[in-house]
Amino acid sequence: MNKKMNIARRDFRNAMLFISLWIIGVIAFKLYPIVISFYYSLTDYSVVKKSEFIGFGNYNALFHDPLFYKSLSNTFYMICLGTVCSTAAAIAIAVLLNNKGIKGLSFLRVVFFIPTLVPVVIASILWIWLLQPDNGIINEVLGFFGLTGPVWLASPLWAKPAFILMMVWSSGTAIIIYLAGLQEIPDSLYESASIDGAGFFRKVFSITLPLLSPVILFNVVTSVIGIFQWFAEPLIMTNGGPDNSTLFYSLNLYRSAFQYFKMGYASAMAWILLVIAMIIILILFRLNKRFGYSE
C-alpha cells in the first residue's frame, strides 16, 4: 500500500515538474496581468508616476466621456452590420462552393481563401488603394455602371461601410469552416426534400441553415471577439478618422494607454469591454439554444 502511494506521489511530482513551465507562464502572462489590470483600473496611473488609488473614479469618468460612447457605438455598428454582412456572404459563398457541379471548384476555394493569408498591414494598404475616391478600383467599377462612388475613408458616413467591405473580402477562414459544416449535412435530407418538391431556397432555409447553426454560432462568436479586438486596420487606414467615425473600442483603448499614458483609465475600459463581450456572447448562446439546432 505504501509502495503504491510512494509511486503515486512520485508520478504526481514528476507531472508537476513537467508542466511547471506552463504553470509559471500562465501565472506570469495571463493571471497576473488580469489581476493587476483590475487594480490599476481603480487607480490614477500614468506609468511615469506612482499609482494613486481613486476607487471607481475611472469608471465614473468613462461614463461621462463622449469618445467612450462614440467608440462603443462604432464597434456595435461593426458587430451588427459587419457581422451580418460577412456571415451572409460567407454562407452564400460556402453554399456555392459546396456545389460539386461547378467546374474548377478547388481553384475557387483557394481564391476565396487567399485574402486571409495576406498580412494585415499589406491588406490595409491594399484597401487604401482600392478605396481611393478618384482612381480606386471600386469607384472605377461603380463608374462603369454609371454610379458615382463615395469618398469612402474620407467620409464619416462611408468609412465604416468601407471596413465592412474589407471584412467580407477577408472572410475566407469562415468560408472554409462553413464549407466543412455543409459537407457534414447528409445528402439524403436534400434528396428527401427534392422528392417532396422542395426548391433550392426551401432546402437552404429548412435544412442547411438549421443544421449549420452550431457552425454559424462559432463563426459569429469569433467574429464578435475579433471586432472587439479590431485595432491594426483602423489605425493604419484612418487612425480613427474622419471625425472619429472609425474610432473603434480597441483603438480608443490603445490611445488612452499608450498615447495619453492613462493606464488606469485604459484598464477600466478593458474591464468594461470584457463585461460587454461576455454579455453579448451569452446572448448569442441563449439565442442559439432557443432557435438553433442541437443533437
Image: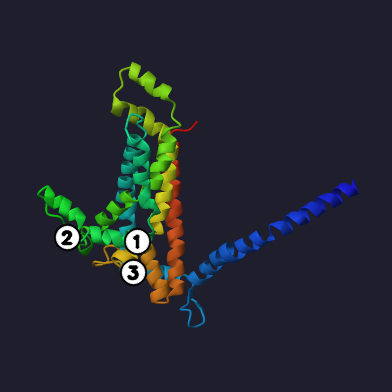
Compare residues 124 and 70 and report the one nearer the observer: 124
Sooner in the amino-acid sequence: mark 2 or mark 3 = 3
Residue 102 appears in view: yes
Outermost residue toward the right?
2
Mark 1 neighbour density, 10 Å: few (under 14) some (14–19) many (20 or more): few
Element on which disc 1 rests: helix
**Measured Cα–Cα span from mark 1 to mark 2:** 19 Å
Q: Residue at x 40, y 37 (%)?
A: 179
Residue 249 appears in view: no
Outermost residue toward the bottom?
49
**Measured Cα–Cα span from mark 2 to mark 3:** 38 Å
Q: Is residue 207 left or right of residue 127?
A: right
Q: Residue at x 42, y 77 (%)?
A: 261
Q: Position of residue 8 (x, y in %)?
A: 81, 50
Compare residues 140 and 220 and report the one nearer the observer: 140
Sooner in the amino-acid sequence: mark 1 or mark 2 = 1
Residue where numbered disc 2 is placed: 135
**Measured Cα–Cα span from mark 1 to mark 3:** 34 Å
Element on which disc 3 rests: loop
